[in-house]
Image (tube, helix red, strand yellow):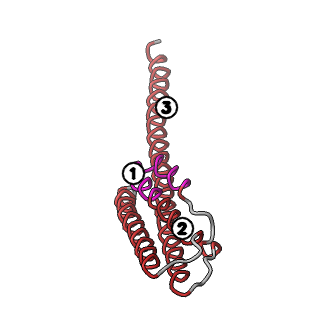
Amino acid sequence: MAGEWIGVVGTVVGVVAGGSVTYYVTRAKIEHEEKLERNRRQLSKLETIHALFSKITQQTNLMSINVIANLADGITIDPKIMGDKLPLEELQMHADIYIPEVSSKVNDIFNKWMDFGKVLAEVIMKPSINDSERKDFILKSQEIALTIARLCKEAKQIVVDKAKKHL
């Protein structure tokens, strides 16, 4: 009678052991796949943030050139040259969620763009600009554009450093 039970007990123990091993291996595989997917998603968002910083730098430079052309040669400022809407809000959202280390730089860029808007408004609204004012407007727009470019470059480096950790 004991011999009959040995086979049943052995089968039950084998099923429990095999099921346990399968469960733990499957769980480890799912956790690994979830971690890989999180890394892919984080890397994708960091790439988006990097591209947004590049776009802001490009649009800032285009607008600065547009202001200088207006002041130097009287060429009308064309908002179409900037392309799409400046993606500051989108950048702020992505930075706050995925890389808060650059949120302060985004705020600084936003503030500089507000300064740039003031310069732009003055250039557009002023009926006549003398040479001294023209020089001041050009210097202000260049200083703002260079500051924004510097802030974007610094932020992009932080993004790159974080992205490298996800590779």
> Which residue does the image show at 50% across and 70% down from the upper left?
60
The answer to which of 11 and 46 lies nearer the viewer is: 46
In the image, farthest residue toward the top: 1
Q: Position of residue 19 (x, y in %)?
A: 49, 31
Graded by Cα atoms within 10 Å as few (under 14), some (14 to 19) or many (20 or more), the crowding at tag 3 reads few
Amino acid beneath label 1: Ser
Mark 2 Cα-neighbour bin, 10 Å: few <14, some 14–19, many ≥20: few
Residue type marked 3: Gly
Instruction: Choose between 10 and 135: the one closer to the eye.
Output: 135
Which residue does the numbered mark 3 point to in the structure image? Answer: 19
Q: Which of the numbered marks, if any, corresponds to residue 104?
A: 1
- Real-space Cα separation, disc 2 to disc 3, in angstroms: 75 Å
| Residue name at image x 59 percent, y 69 percent | 125
Amino acid type for the residue under numbered disc 2: Glu
> What's the residue at 36%, 60% (across, down)?
164
Front of the two marks 2 and 3? 2
Residue 108 sits inside the magenta stretch:
yes
Q: Secondary structure at mark 1?
A: helix
Which element carries disc 2, helix, strand or loop?
helix
Upstream in sequence: badge 2 or badge 3 = 3
Which disc is residue 36 wearing? none
Query: Which quadrant of the rendered structure holds the C terminus?
Result: bottom left
Residue drawn 34% across the image and 60% down it: 161
Q: Are marks 2 and 3 in contact (CB under 8 Å)?
A: no
Q: Nearer the viewer, mark 1 or mark 2?
A: 2
Question: Badge 2 is on which residue?
Answer: 122
The image position of residue 109, as x and y in percent, is 44, 59
Report the number of discs: 3
- How would you rate the neighbour count of disc 1 (Cα within 10 Å): few for under 14, some for 14-19, many for 20 or more? some
The residues bearing labels 3 and 1 have C-alpha atoms spaced at a distance of 52 Å
> Closer to the camera, 46 or 7?
46
Find the magenta span and give its range.
Answer: 89-111
